[in-house]
Each structure stands twice: as C-alpha cells, then as structure tokens.
Image (cartoon, rainbow, N blue to C red):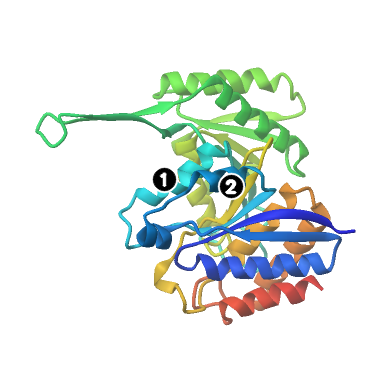
C-alpha cells in the first residue's frame, strides 16, 4: 500500500498556477516511481479571489490547512491590489496562524548555472539560511502619531520573545548537526547597534551551544555578513538570523545561486505543517506566456519531500533538477530557457526515470 500525503495547493496569482502545475506534474511522476501517494486539494486563495469576492483567507480554510501534511504555494501578488494587503492578510496571516516560525532557504549553486561572483563555483556556494519567521519587525508592532502633519511620528517595533528566539536557534543547531556540511553555525545580528534584540539573540545562541559542542559557532554583524556572502561564501554552512535580516540576506543568496529561477524556500512548523514556495513572486508580466521558469517551484516540491521524510525521493528529484540545469536548459531566465514552462517540467520528469 502506498503512503498517502495530503497536500494543500495554493496556485495563487500571476505565473503561480503555471509553475505549480509543473511541480504537481513532477510529484505525480515521483509517486508513480515510488510507494508515495499525493492527495492534492486546491485552495482558491489570492488576489483574483480578493478582487472578485473580497475574501482573503477564511477561518475554515485556516482550520483545514492546520490538518494538512504540507502546503504547496505558487505565489501571492496581484497588480490590481494595493501593496501590503495580500502580503499581510494572506502570507503573514498564514505564517502566524499556522505558526510557521522557521523560514528555511537553501542557497546552492548547481553545475551549469552562472553566478555573478567571479571565480566561484558550486563547491563555494552551498549553505542554508534559517530565518525566524513569526516575530521581529514583521509582528506588526508600532503605529503613527500626528500622521500627515509636520510633526508626524512613525514607530515600528521589533518584537522578540525568548521562546521565539530559542526555538529558532535550536532548530538551526539541530539542522546544522544533521546536515552533511561543515557543522558551522553563524549567528547574523547587529549587537553593536540593536542592543536589546541582539543581546537576547546572542545570549540564547551561546547558551544553546553548550548542548551542541560538536558545532562550531561564529557571529557576524549583518552588514559584514552581506559582504562576506559575496566575497567569501564558502565560509558558510548554516546561518541563523532574525526575520528582517533573513529577508534581506536570502535575496543575496538567491542571486549568487543563479537567480530567482532556481530559488525555493520553506515556511515550517516542525511540530505542525509547512508551506513550500518559489521565492520569485507572481511575475504577472509573464503570466500565460509559458515562458516562466518552473524550476524554483519544482525545487520547492523537492524541499517538501525532504520535510515529509521521503529522503530517497527527495534525492532523486534533486538529481533530476541538477541534470536539467547542467545539461538541458540554456538559461534560468524567463523566456531564455530554450524550452517552455511545461517542457522544462517534462525534462525533469524524464530525468527522474
């Protein structure tokens, strides 16, 4: 009997449905070659429904998503919706309601993929960023005083709890231990300026290190770390950081690994469910053209397999992705791959066999 997994599918906006379709195609191919069965349920969540019905995420949808094994997200973002609405009321709400407190971003350069870093190759760019995903500057603390006047004051607060900081750091230590890497964990902060927040992060980091003596630890200010990611990325194995800094440094990670066409991420509750997505956004100008690169979405599906504990299937899919980028497509850029969106999905399926 096949092992069944319930997968919620949120195709989203723009090119989201196109890349999700290729991810599902690949997962179905994995299912045919293994003892896995994926039961997909689609949720109409995104900008189109908001414009049509005024609905963002319903309470019963949140309840259903809490009972699902994993979530496969295409992209959320619509040019017809004011910026901030979909981000806050869909993406952030899903993170908070499902307590997806870990954002996991592998940064790996594959053979055959160009990086803007001179002289660097696949052996130099291979690390993971563990970003706290539910607190910090994104928790929504703050407000305005005398808005719209010459005396206006805007306050944005960073909320960091001991519980939130500790569970993120512990996940990073555990991930660093099980990863086949350098067993080196770097804390990214700014303790020379952001005194209180960084002090909490640094103290918890050092205290937890006592439980993981096999892990080498390091601390870097966020501005220095951004520089070293470009100059000397080979020093990194796992990086752990807060919500805001993680948001910034993972975009640097995306470009040095070849761009948004290959970058995927996971939003994870280790005690609950998880949501996996390409990080490139909805790219509405490419919608319906069949030109968008689906490899980031397929890589998100590969991360999902790892999260579900299906490591053999995950390794086979990773090998297929590497074969396609190294031997098949011309470029990771939309419209320049040498194949259509669906044809790239077909290439991955053929490389699985």
Name the side, left or right, on which 309 lies relative to 114. Answer: right
> Which mark is first along the chain, 2 or 1?
1
Q: Is residue 18 above or below residue 8?
A: below
Q: Position of residue 340 (x, y in %)?
A: 56, 80
Which residue is found at the position 66% from the left and 66% from the top?
Answer: 24
Identified at 9% across, 33% down, the residue is: 150
Circle 2: element type: helix
Circle 1 SS class: helix
Residue at position x 75%, y 42% in the image: 179
At 51% from the left edge and 37% from the top edge, which residue is drawn? Answer: 96
- Quadrant where the image shows the N terminus: bottom right
Direction from residue 302 to residue 53 in the image, left or right = left
Question: Label 2: how many residues lie within 10 Å, few (<14), some (14-19) or many (20+)?
Answer: many
Q: Position of residue 338 (x, y in %)?
A: 57, 82
Residue indicated by mark 2: 233
State how far apart marks 1 and 2 are (Cα): 35 Å
Q: Quadrant of the C terminus?
A: bottom right
In the image, residue 173 lies at what x, y percent?
69, 31
Which corner quadrant of the image does residue 181 belong to? top right
């Amino acid at each position: 009997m096949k092992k069944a997994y319930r997968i919620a599918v949120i195709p989203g906006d723009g090119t989201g449905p196109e890349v999700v379709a290729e991810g599902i195609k690949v997962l179905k191919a994995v299912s045919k070659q293994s003892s896995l069965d994926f039961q997909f349920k689609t949720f109409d969540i995104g900008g189109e429904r908001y414009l049509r019905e005024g609905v963002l995420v319903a309470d019963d949808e949140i309840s259903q998503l809490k009972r699902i094994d994993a979530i496969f997200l295409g992209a959320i973002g619509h040019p017809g919706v004011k910026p901030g609405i979909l981000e806050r009321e869909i993406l952030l709400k899903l993170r908070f309601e499902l307590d997806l407190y870990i954002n996991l971003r592998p940064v790996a350069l594959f053979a055959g993929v160009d990086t803007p870093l001179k002289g660097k190759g696949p052996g130099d760019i291979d690390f993971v960023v563990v970003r706290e995903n539910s607190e910090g500057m994104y928790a929504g603390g703050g407000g305005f005083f005398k808005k719209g006047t010459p005396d206006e004051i805007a306050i944005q607060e960073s909320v960091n709890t001991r519980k939130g900081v500790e569970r993120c750091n512990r996940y990073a230590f555990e991930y660093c231990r099980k990863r086949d890497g350098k067993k080196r964990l770097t804390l990214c902060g700014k303790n020379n300026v952001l005194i209180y927040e960084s002090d909490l992060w640094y103290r918890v980091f050092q205290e937890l290190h006592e439980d993981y003596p096999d892990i080498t630890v390091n601390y870097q200010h966020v501005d220095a770390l951004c520089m070293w990611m470009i100059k000397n990325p080979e020093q990194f194995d796992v990086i752990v950081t807060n919500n805001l800094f993680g948001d910034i440094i993972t975009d640097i990670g995306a470009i040095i690994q070849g761009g948004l066409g290959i970058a995927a991420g996971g939003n994870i509750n280790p005690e609950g469910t998880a949501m996996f997505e390409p990080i490139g956004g909805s790219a509405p100008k490419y919608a319906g053209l069949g030109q968008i690169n689906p490899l980031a979405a397929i890589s998100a599906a590969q991360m999902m397999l790892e999260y579900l504990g299906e490591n053999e299937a995950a390794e086979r899919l990773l090998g297929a992705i590497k074969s396609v980028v190294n031997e098949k497509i011309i470029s990771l850029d939309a419209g320049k791959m040498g194949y259509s969106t669906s044809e790239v999905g077909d290439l991955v399926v053929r490389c699985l066999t």
